[in-house]
Image: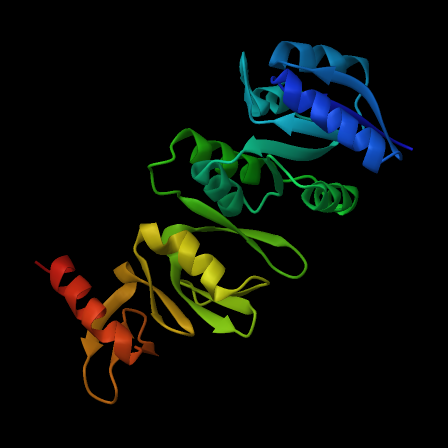
Amino acid sequence: MLTAIIVEDLLDAMELLKSDLKSKHPEIKIIDTAPSVVEAAKALRKEQPDILFLDIMLGDGTGFDVLEIFPELKSKIIFVTASDEYAIKAFKFAAIDYVLKPYSYEELDKAIARAKEQIQPSKERLNILKETLSAPEKKPNKISLHTLDKIIIVNLDDIVRCESDSNNTIFHLQDGRKVFVTKTLKYFADMLKPYDFLRIHQSHLVNLQCISAFIKTDGGYLMLKNGENVPVSVRKKAEIIEILDTMHR
């Protein structure tokens, strides 16, 4: 039997989650619920559950305030957040799992399965999540990358380019390191597009700040500041020329 505490400030949402857990996950016993940071702190002082369902936005603060009160918290955390593009972006940059309200049974099942297996997110990853959520319009400084066996945190400015490897992505960093990540190039192209990264080819995503020149011969390719050459697809040539013209004005 696993124990759980639900921290959720909307009564309807809390009751729904309680009901879903009781009917779909009888192996999880709800030992307490809390609608606020203060009440969550009281509940966690009494007993730390195996799983903590933690809403991000609470009436008297945020889920992060709860975590700061309990820096040594042993519970596995399932973050619950409203359907918000900025929140989704923040969780992706931090490589932290979340459940979107309103969720489906399937999403809840997956989140619980992941929580049973997961290691707690590091303080640095939680900081990335917190900073990206608190300043949604600002370019994030760091990104967490899920490799096969660990999570690596890198500065966004240290990424030179990303290269597709079937359904995976290879990150090429300024110091020459390569990081193999188990997500598609499209996933990162969508995520990084607002931050001066451009998909220049089916297999290549490039940091615009790392481009040295566009060479029009040999089918067209980019010379990067680290000496690498990267091909440009025919349909992307006009866009590349326009962007580079704008950057050098």
Q: Is residue 33 left or right of residue 143?
A: right
Specify the color scheme: rainbow
Above or below, 29 relative to 37: below
The quarter of the image holding the N terminus is: top right
The residue at 53%/41% (across/down) is 91
The residue at 27%/72% (across/down) is 236
Above or below, 199 relative to 98: below
Most extreme residue toward the right is 1
Q: Is residue 204 left or right of residue 244?
A: right
Q: Position of residue 72 (x, y in %)?
A: 71, 27
The residue closer to the viewer here, 226 or 131, is 131
The residue at 27%/59% (across/down) is 209
Q: Is residue 74 visible?
A: no
The residue closer to the viewer here, 177 or 181, is 181
Q: How many marks?
A: 0
Q: Position of residue 4 (x, y in %)?
A: 79, 27
Above or below, 3 relative to 84: above
The residue at 89%/35% (across/down) is 27
Q: Is residue 17 visible?
A: yes
Most extreme residue toward the left is 249
Q: Position of residue 197 (x, y in %)?
A: 33, 59
Most extreme residue toward the bottom is 218
Image quadrant where residue 225 sits? bottom left
Image quadrant where residue 168 sits? bottom right
The residue closer to the viewer here, 60 or 107, is 107
Q: Is residue 232 left or right of residue 87?
A: left
Above or below, 184 relative to 222: above
Q: Position of residue 151 (x, y in %)?
A: 60, 52
The quarter of the image holding the C terminus is: bottom left
